[in-house]
Image (cartoon, coloured by chain):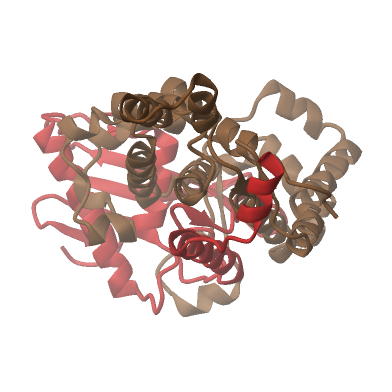
Amino acid sequence: MTAGPTPTWHGLFLMRVGLGLFLANKGAWLFGGKLQGVVSRPEALFHSPLVETLHLPFPPPVLGLWGPFVELLGWMIALGIGWRVAAVLASVAIVYIGSCLSGFGYFNHGSIIIPQMLWVLVVSPGADACSVDRLARGLWRRRHDSIDSARLVGDWLGPATPSWGLRLAGGLLVLIYAGGGISKLRYAPVDWLSGSTLRAYLTGMEQQYWLGPSSYVSSLVMDPPIWAFSYVSLPTALGHWIAAYPTLCALIAVATVIVALFPWMELFRALRGSPGGGRT
Amino acid sequence: MAEASATKLDLRKPRAGFLLVAFALTLANAAAIVAPFEIYPFTSSPMFAHPPVGSGTRYLVEVKVLTPSSGDGVFPYEAIGFTETHFVRTLLVRGYGSADAGAPYGFVRDDDDAARTRRLQVFFRACVDALREREALPAGITGIRLSLRAKDREGPTREIGTYDLASDGFQRPGTSR
């Protein structure tokens, strides 16, 4: 059990600055070169539930500003300038583009962490430590009250905070990665754990489209029941090299499941602990 | 002072906003795993879980532009913002679809031939409209043919159907236009 206060502030502070700097430098990169593709694709092909509900997408001129907009928001989040509003806007912007792309069958799994963590930051106490917002508030108070420099710095660092924010962030990461691990065991566990599925993808079979279960054939007389489709990436020399070693593929496949599912134990341990507090 | 502050704050209860976000995110992520579903930004990450091995013939998808004057050509997917891979993927998800609930994408509940034909018609009409808007519609085009070519197996290309620009309809082989 944790003894004494848990110094949570630096975790949330680093999370805020890290996410902000990532968006500031990689905002446009977040969805690769697909952003421009979204701009020029036929609007009639959007079918994401969110996009349809909100009558999106925005017209191309607005979409074209997406990258610079997210990068600006990233700087605001990292520096702590109106950062809660910026974080909400950034999460909306990312979900928007992610929804547009998922409407085309492209689902950027890695990027889903970012909007979720932004939402966690927005509602978590302590995430605004060392922010320009907090410093400005302190300086403004100093003009009216007699606050010494030590108090000013103390205010800028922020108050002690419970660790709920970090625990929620950790719990969500566990859930997200567990989803991937569970999926690998849900659909074809033997194929995955033996490494055969991994080898198939590494060698480029994903560029082809294959038949689904035979039961599907009887339900439709029209066409071959194409069931799955490309995951975009082209095979690489490294992929072919790894695929040449079946045992290595099996080890990697098993390791991915362990990595995805093992953190559940950490989650249970965290839930058993009492929320701590820390000094900002 | 720090300890006193921490002790005091340890007794605080989470704010309603925090609890609401925590509940919503946890529930949505858990539901995505259990259901499973993919609605951005929630997913069960099914992608590589699906084994492209031991499940029968694999196909390459071909989309050709029919121009009687100059012969068949490759569909100009780049003119409307796609790579070939993304275009085929979008076609399979939004046009072709799947009646199998286990499919990673494109599952259509209670699907049938008529519904699929309608989806393909809507899909190709949108493509043609987009090409026309971008002034990239190939000269002399009369239709767009969708077909499958079995991979790793000898045999003819299997035609799924053709979108006819004049009638704005998706016609299957052997059906009257």
- Describe residue B137's horizontal placement relative to residue B161 as left or right: left
Q: Quadrant of the C terminus of chain A?
A: top right
Q: In which quarter of the image is residue B39?
A: bottom left
User: Where is residue B106 shown, x and y percent of the image?
Assistant: 43, 61
Write the residue at 26% across / 50% down: A45
Against B79, is A256 above or below? below
Relative depth, front residue between A157 and B41 = A157
Answer yes or no: is residue B159 visible: no
Write the residue at 76% across / 58% down: A264
> Which chain is drawn using red?
B
Q: Colour of chain A?
A: brown
Q: In which quarter of the image is the N terminus of chain A?
A: bottom right
Against A84, is A139 above or below? above
> Count of labels shown?
0
User: Where is residue A149 shown, x and y percent of the image?
Assistant: 50, 20
- Describe residue A20's horizontal placement relative to residue A172 as left or right: left
Relative depth, front residue between B1 and A16 = B1
Relative depth, front residue between A52 and B82 = A52
Relative depth, front residue between B62 and B115 = B115
Write the residue at 40% across / 29% down: A138
Residue farthest toward the right in the current orientation of the protein: A247
Write the residue at 32% across / 28% down: A140
User: Where is residue A42 shown, x and y percent of the image?
Assistant: 21, 43
